[in-house]
């Protein structure tokens, strides 16, 4: 009777423990992986094995006079649960040791079929219960068959582990090692002392607990989940980048023709005034479309952390004057008083990314011009100077439509346009303010909003810029003077320079020729990388404008072949519609001397010609 009480007590503790582990496992969030699903089944089988074993301990007590049929039924349940348990452990071992997970599903189907056959055999084969001393010992073919299957699957598990030497140090196989060592010890002990048959079920529970730490380690799972999410995000970002590159190329290529021809026509002498006005409208529409494309690309660059802040010395007053002119053009014929107030204490030289600063201010001024039909727009810039830092305080206040108080928090959300129905006639994508805020954050600045719906809005941005001292300016002026002296002492007569344009698109070639025609240049054009290589071998050129995205041989491939030509040292400019952030740096690092984006901007083109041809 003491053996029975010991059996019941130890198995009761084991049952409580496995139920607690099961509650913890099923109540927490888990990854939808095979191992986790399998372990859930493994826990259920462990609970059934231990519960049915515990019931057997009660049923064999002589004082209870439990019918033999009921004892046999519970024993059968115990055997079936035991077969499920060892089968789940074998499936776990097979999965952990499989090199190719793709073939695992087929193996598993065969394996579960084998287990189904074993359960049928355990049900139909006979068995009985013999009383030996104070213990009830199950006997018969069903028990012999079940334990034989248990032993065969155990050997199969060992074979899976030792198949590859690296598996021997894999912590996932610790449960197999425990079953091999402690299981052997328990069986030997039970053969010597049949009364001590109550240790096998607690061993199963112990293995289940160990598996919890090999499968369901929360930290490891968190890392795995983060890695999976990271991989998916990287793939999605790569696909998005590729799409944006293609979109940039496809949209900018026809825009290049539209803006190029329009600029050339606008400079034609004898053009009727009516035609000039139409051309201005074409250029304005093209710039609007380009602004939308650039906005989409900018927000994507920022989100991918690929946008760069490039700090240089600049004259803020020149920038403010450009912003004033651009805003007046944007206001057009609207009855709006545009008032500009510039603080005279702002230093004449600042050090920062004036391109981004200009973009931030222009976004604010453009919004004011868009959403104000009449009244005024006040553009104020003041400063606070501390040591060598000038804090620019940029204020744009308008008497426009204003913003509802409950919508202000949504202002800086990308692709969000407030009061869409009322503002349906106003151009834009809702990206300007989102880009503005992100650029300010990148430069450690900030922005505030005040607005009264129906009366107007006031946006205030704060940006810190470094002050350039007189010594810095003097040093730069000396460098510039030395460069000028070098140019003046150069006695080489500047004659017509030879430029080669390479582009597979005939329209792009025509645009480039048209834009370059007013300069003292001899222009040659070809439509493929191979033609370019052959022509360079025959003729000398002073500059090559090379498109990248060409069929058969890209611009990059062409450049590689060009550099294989003995003595090749012609400045080669990447001429491309791929205007994603970082592309300039990528082309320069590849070996191009410079970068020119499509649509070709007149100012940028002139900078290239001045830099490489002294024109």
Image (spheres, rainbow, N blue to C red):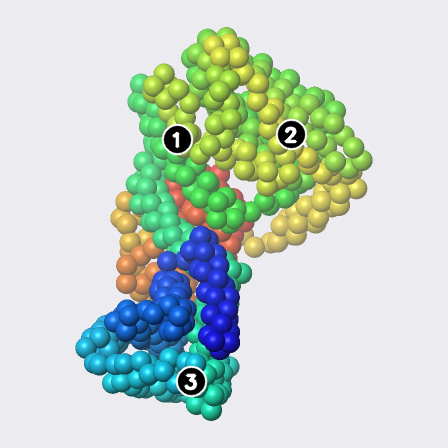
Residue 120 lies, in percent from the top left, at 20, 75
The disc at residue 429 is 1
Count of marks placed on residues: 3
Q: Report helix, strand or loop for mark 2.
A: strand
Mark 2 or mark 3: whose residue is earlier in sequence: 3
Mark 3 or mark 1: whose residue is earlier in sequence: 3
Mark 1 or mark 2: whose residue is earlier in sequence: 1
- Between 611 and 249, the residue placed more toward the observer is 249
| Residue 263 visible in this rendered orientation of the protein | no
Which image quarter: residue 314? top right
Q: Which residue is mark 2?
A: 462
Q: CA distance from mark 2 to mark 3?
A: 91 Å
Residue 579 lies, in percent from the top left, at 42, 47
Q: Which residue is mark 3?
A: 133
Q: CA distance from mark 1 to mark 2?
A: 25 Å
Question: Depth-wise, is mark 2 or mark 3 nearer the camera?
Answer: 3
Q: CA distance from mark 3 to mark 1?
A: 88 Å
Query: Is 394 drawn above or below residue 355 in the view shown?
Result: above
Q: Report helix, strand or loop for mark 1.
A: loop
Q: Residue at x 66, y 26 (%)?
A: 393
Question: Depth-wise, is mark 3 or mark 1 nearer the camera?
Answer: 3
- Between 105 and 359, the residue placed more toward the observer is 105
């Amino acid at each position: 009777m003491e053996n029975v009480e010991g059996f019941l007590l130890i198995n009761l503790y084991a049952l409580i423990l496995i139920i607690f582990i099961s509650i913890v496992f099923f109540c927490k969030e888990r990854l939808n992986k095979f191992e986790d699903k399998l372990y859930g089944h493994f826990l259920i089988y462990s609970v059934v094995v231990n519960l049915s074993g515990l019931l057997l301990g009660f049923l064999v007590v002589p004082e209870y006079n439990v019918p033999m049929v009921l004892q046999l039924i519970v024993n059968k349940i115990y055997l079936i649960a035991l077969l499920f348990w060892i089968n789940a452990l074998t499936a776990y071992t097979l999965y952990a040791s499989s090199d190719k997970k793709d073939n695992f599903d087929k193996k598993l189907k065969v394996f579960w079929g084998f287990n189904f056959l074993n359960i049928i055999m355990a049900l139909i084969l006979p068995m009985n219960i013999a009383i030996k001393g104070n213990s009830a010992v199950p006997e018969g073919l069903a028990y012999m068959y079940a334990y034989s299957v248990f032993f065969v699957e155990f050997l199969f598990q060992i074979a899976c582990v030792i198949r590859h030497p690296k598996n021997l140090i894999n912590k996932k196989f610790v449960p197999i090692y425990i079953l091999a060592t402690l299981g052997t010890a328990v069986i030997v002990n039970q053969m010597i002392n049949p009364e001590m048959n109550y240790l096998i079920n607690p061993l199963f529970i112990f293995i289940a607990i160990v598996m919890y730490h090999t499968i369901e380690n929360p930290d490891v799972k968190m890392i795995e989940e983060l890695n999976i999410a990271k991989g998916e995000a990287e793939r999605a970002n790569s696909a998005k980048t590729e799409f944006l590159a293609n979109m940039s190329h496809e949209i900018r290529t026809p825009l290049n023709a539209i803006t190029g021809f329009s600029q050339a026509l606008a400079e034609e002498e004898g053009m009727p005034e009516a035609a000039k006005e139409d051309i201005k409208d074409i250029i304005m529409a093209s710039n609007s479309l380009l602004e939308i494309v650039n906005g989409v690309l900018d927000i994507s660059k920022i989100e991918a952390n690929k946008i760069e802040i490039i700090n240089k010395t600049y004259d803020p007053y020149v920038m403010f004057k450009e912003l004033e002119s651009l805003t007046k053009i944007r206001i057009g014929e609207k009855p709006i008083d545009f008032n500009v107030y510039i603080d005279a204490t702002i230093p004449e030289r600042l050090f920062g990314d004036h391109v981004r600063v200009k973009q931030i201010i222009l976004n604010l001024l453009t919004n004011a011009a868009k959403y104000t039909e009449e009244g005024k727009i006040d553009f104020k810039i003041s400063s606070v100077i501390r040591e060598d830092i000038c804090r620019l305080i940029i204020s744009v206040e308008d008497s426009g439509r204003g913003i509802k108080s409950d919508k202000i928090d949504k202002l800086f959300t990308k692709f969000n346009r407030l009061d869409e129905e009322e503002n349906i006639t106003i151009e834009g994508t809702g990206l300007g303010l989102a880009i503005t805020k992100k650029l300010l954050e990148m430069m450690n600045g900030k922005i505030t909003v005040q607005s009264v719906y129906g009366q107007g809005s006031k946006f205030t941005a704060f940006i810190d810029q470094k002050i350039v001292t007189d010594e810095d300016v003097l040093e730069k002026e000396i460098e510039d003077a030395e460069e000028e002296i070098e140019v003046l002492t150069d006695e080489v007569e500047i004659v017509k320079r030879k430029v080669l344009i390479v582009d597979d698109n005939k329209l792009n070639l025509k645009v480039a020729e048209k834009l370059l025609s007013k300069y003292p240049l001899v222009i040659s054009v070809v439509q493929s990388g191979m033609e370019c290589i052959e022509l360079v071998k025959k003729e000398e050129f002073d500059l090559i404008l090379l498109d990248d995205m060409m069929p058969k041989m890209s611009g990059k491939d062409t450049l590689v072949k060009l550099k294989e030509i003995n003595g090749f040292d012609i400045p080669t400019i990447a001429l491309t519609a791929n205007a994603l952030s970082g592309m300039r740096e990528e082309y320069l690092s590849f070996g191009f001397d410079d970068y020119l984006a499509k649509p070709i901007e007149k100012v940028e083109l002139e900078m290239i010609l001045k830099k490489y041809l002294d024109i």
